[in-house]
Image (cartoon, helix red, strand yellow):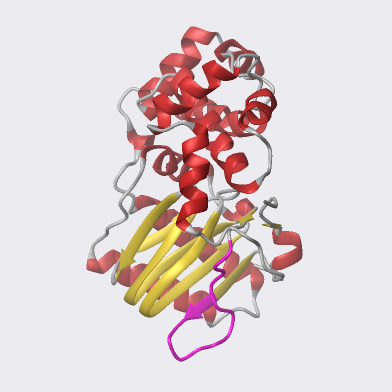
Amino acid sequence: MNQPPCHKAAENLQQKLELRIISPDSGLNPPKTYAHCDDYYIFGIIDHGSTRIECDFREITLGQGELMFVKPWQIHRFISSTKLHARIMFADSSLISNRSSMIFEDAFLHGFSIRTTTETLKELSQLFDIIRSHTDSPPLTESIGKAFTDLFADTLVIDHTDTPGVSQRQRQHYLLFRKALTMHIRSSRSPSYYADLLSLSPVYLNEIVKRISGMSVTGNIQTEIVLQAKRMLAYSDMTVKEISCALGFDDSSYFNRLFRQISGTTPAKFRQNLESSGSNLNPSIDSR
């Protein structure tokens, strides 16, 4: 197995915002059916028809009037569609506000359903069309793009940024914790390690994280470990023991127990199920 390709905004986006229309009549730029990740956000509005995508090993089916988004570094692929007409926006991370970034982080962590009112859906579509008609003016499109992503974030059902008793500074600590977790999970799974990185006490960090995410720091760490392990099981030839060591476990049996506790299956069984499903996990030669 190969590592999935990771597309970079600097190489794949001519501007900080790029738009695409997917329709049955257009054979241009078809969605990618191979697993890959990007260092930028993807937002979608399903105008008609339906589609199935896979994002970090979770299949999501979307229909008319629904929304979707993919965070940077999430491994995803297009599976299938039926009479699909959709508006897709690719956005550089620099255009996403801290508040919206936190909402997207929460939604990814908890699982989400993106449903909105007809009026909000209309507003998002109008903003998309305005951006599309002013692509020759990057400053204007970026400004409208920020409004689009903020409005998009507000449509998420699970929004922990308005949790009573949580200050803006505490929300910022939480966002920095989540970012540190994705960057340093292979170096340490100690709650105190992340507290030290943020110059906070472990007790205080745990209080913030649990209040906002609903899980303790340890719970967040364990969830991230299993996600990283799933990616390696799917896209590398490393043995379970090698993966265990790469994630900092001296005892592979403990790693196996943790993986099963979080995912409901063993690492070996998870890989076996992927292989038997015949999923298209091999990258093709292409860009975005």
Residue at 53% x, 64% y is 145
Residue reaching furthest to the bottom: 25
Which residue: 59% across, 19% down?
252
- Nearer to me, 58 or 267: 267
Q: Which residues are magenta?
A: 20-34
Q: Is residue 68 above or below residue 204?
A: below
The answer to whether residue 156 is left or right of residue 275 is left
Q: Where is residue 112 drawn, in percent x and y?
A: 34, 47
179 relative position to 14: left or right = left
Specify the quadrant of the image occupied by residue 63: bottom left
- Residue 251 lies in quadrant: top right
Residue 59 in picture, x, y percent from top left: 39, 55
Instruction: Examine the residues drawn in magenta and state their main secondary structure.
Output: loop
In this view of the protein, can residue 40 be seen by the observer?
Answer: yes
How many marks the image carries: the answer is 0
Q: Is residue 247 left or right of residue 68?
A: right
Q: Position of residue 32 (x, y in %)?
A: 57, 69
Quadrant (top left, top right, bottom left, bottom right) of the C terminus: bottom right
Q: Is 210 situated above or below 122?
A: above
Is residue 167 visible in the rendered image? The answer is no
- Residue 199 painted magenta: no
Which residue is painted at 64% across and 13% down in the image?
196
224 or 149, nearer to the observer: 224
**Vertical arrangement, residue 250 with respect to residue 256, above or below:** above
Viewer-side residue, 11 vs 189: 189
Relative placement, left or right, of 164 versus 88 is left
Image spot of residue 272 (x, y percent): 50, 44
Q: Give the residue at the far right of this rendering.
A: 11
